[in-house]
Amino acid sequence: MMSEVQVHTVARQMLEQHGFAAIAKAAEQAQACEGRGEADEAREWRHIADAMKIIRGPHQS
């Protein structure tokens, strides 16, 4: 399991690389992991997506 610092580092890197589409990409990864029965990995991807939502702020869409 990733530490909180690692989650936020990955979230920032994904946002820099993919813009706000990164949130959708993380959600897709979570679904793919669930489809493979990888519940822990899916939970981490959702955590990363949540971190990206916090980083981007409440007033941006």
Image (cartoon, rainbow, N blue to C red):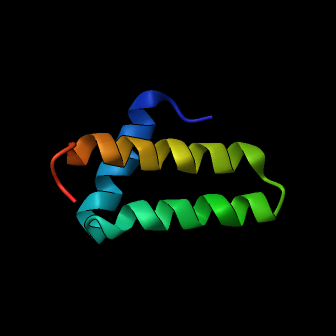
Identify which residue is drawn at 40% across, 49% down. Answer: 10
Identify which residue is drawn at 21% across, 43% down. Answer: 58
* Image quadrant containing the N terminus: top right
* Image quadrant containing the C terminus: bottom left
Vertical comparison of 10 with 1: above or below: below
User: In which quadrant of the rendered view does residue 2 lie?
Assistant: top right
Relative side of 25 to 29, left or right: left
Across and down, in percent, residue 11 comes to 37, 49
Relative side of 60 to 15, left or right: left
Identify which residue is drawn at 62% across, 57% down. Answer: 30
User: In which quadrant of the rendered view does residue 43 lie?
Assistant: top right
Give the number of callouts: 0
In the depicted view, which residue is nearer to us: 39 or 16? 39
Q: Residue furthest left?
A: 59
Vertical comparison of 54 with 21: above or below: above
Across and down, in percent, residue 41 comes to 67, 48
Q: Residue furthest right?
A: 37
Relative side of 43 to 15, left or right: right
Q: Residue furthest top?
A: 4
Across and down, in percent, residue 14 comes to 35, 60
Across and down, in percent, residue 13 comes to 31, 55
Relative side of 57 to 44, left or right: left
Identify which residue is drawn at 24% across, 61% down. Answer: 16
